[in-house]
Amino acid sequence: MADWQKITGGITAPRGYQAAGITAGLKPSLLPDLALIFSDVEAIAAGVFTTSQVKAACVEYCRQRLQAKHSARAILCNAGQANAATGTQGYLDTLESAMAIAQALNISSESVLLASTGVIGQRIKMDALRSGIPKVVAALSQTGSDAAAGAIITTDLVTKSIALETTISDRPVRIGGIAKGSGMIHPNMATMLAFITCDAVVSPALWQQMLARAADRSFNSITVDGDTSTNDSLIALANGQSRTPAIIEWGAEAEKLEAMLTAVCQHLAKAIARDGEGATCLIEVEVTGAHDELSARQIAKTIAGSSLVKSAIFGRDPNWGRIAAAAGRAGVPFEQENLQIKLGDFLMLENGQPLQFDRAAASAYLKKAAAGAYLQEDTVLISVNVGNGHGLGKAWGCDLSYDYVRINAEYTT
């Protein structure tokens, strides 16, 4: 049983945070497009970013900031323009953005972190951003999480938010998060963005380690289309306003905090996969019996990311051969004679031998998952065992529909 409970409030559920989301005119749609997260005090900051060699200006900026200073008070996110592959002027726009929001908040620009999402190759509309900054600062609220979550999305169909609470040293500790992502999702952080707030007291080194591990078990274990964005950013703040004793080394309290952080990240990651462009269902792949967790996760990610597996699930075709083929090409050695594959409750392969199963019922299982979209009853479970090892790993993805091609064929036109 989880040692925490779900609460309302998103990123403003932890103590000492405000948030806002407004329409600044960055998106042609005139939907909300500028978000701000603000901590009442300087917060320990950690980040995990895209490993793409083509990085957005905000990613380079945040990496430099976090290397020089492991704390921050504000995260400003614009939606509409990715400001990636925009050259020197794009980076100058980023610096100006940081200076402008810092001045409006009366804080140092060194305490500002930035994120952008939108079309690659387009600079931020700086006139709109300049005029929007005073408005987003004025809109800051202790109940502003939903507005912020709505202002960071692009092709998303739904906003993504979560908040959890546990107890450390007999005091409540909370973690909240929001995220965006629907297409160009295959994070190697490690377009997806995620922002986490926490009110625990934790050392910078430990907080960064916790976030990196949580990312591997969540955002780095999802895929929609196999494309890694230039802008992938996961930023987490911990401001200490819970007034609990400082967590500075690994132990029971650190383990408890990391488990809750991982749960927040996994909830947001699954919400991104569920909302994949054109998707009708969420796919969850669990691999057991591998040599270690990393190997199991690699097999799971390969299966979840297989275009053939994704297409079969969209077609409601219980074609387990595609699952076996994806597992076999994951680059992880295992004995074929040990392979077991289940789709939901349908056992299809055991000890490397195909089994008879009710194909019509298995297809109906896939149809039921599609009918449950957005009700969190839309999950297709794929279970794979590859041996007798202790490694267990999970990955999440979505099916591949006709609409994915339509959405991306028309993205800039």
Image (cartoon, rainbow, N blue to C red):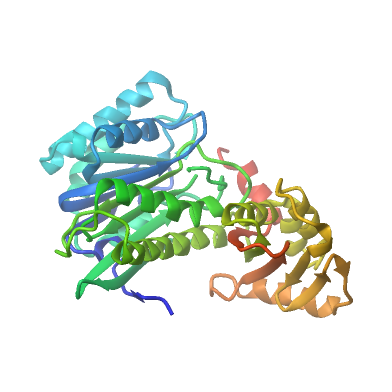
> In this view, which residue lies farthest toward the left?
106
Question: Residue 117, image x and y in percent?
Answer: 43, 42
Residue located at (59% from left, 60% from top): 393
Q: Is residue 51 left or right of residue 98?
A: right
Q: Is residue 27 left or right of residue 40?
A: right
* Residue 158 vertical placement versus 152 (above, below): below
Quadrant of the image for the N terminus?
bottom left
Q: Is residue 211 left or right of residue 412?
A: left
Location of residue 86 (image quadrant): top left
Quadrant of the image for the C terminus?
top right
Location of residue 47 (image quadrant): top left
* Residue 258 vertical placement versus 366 (above, below): above
Question: Residue 84, image x and y in percent?
Answer: 45, 31
What count of labels does the image hold? 0
Question: Residue 272, image x and y in percent?
Answer: 51, 57
Residue located at (25% from left, 41% from top): 70
Q: Is residue 24 visible?
A: no
Residue located at (51% from left, 29% from top): 53
Q: Is residue 245 visible?
A: yes
Question: Residue 310, image x and y in percent?
Answer: 71, 57
For this rendering, which residue is in front, 347 or 231? 347
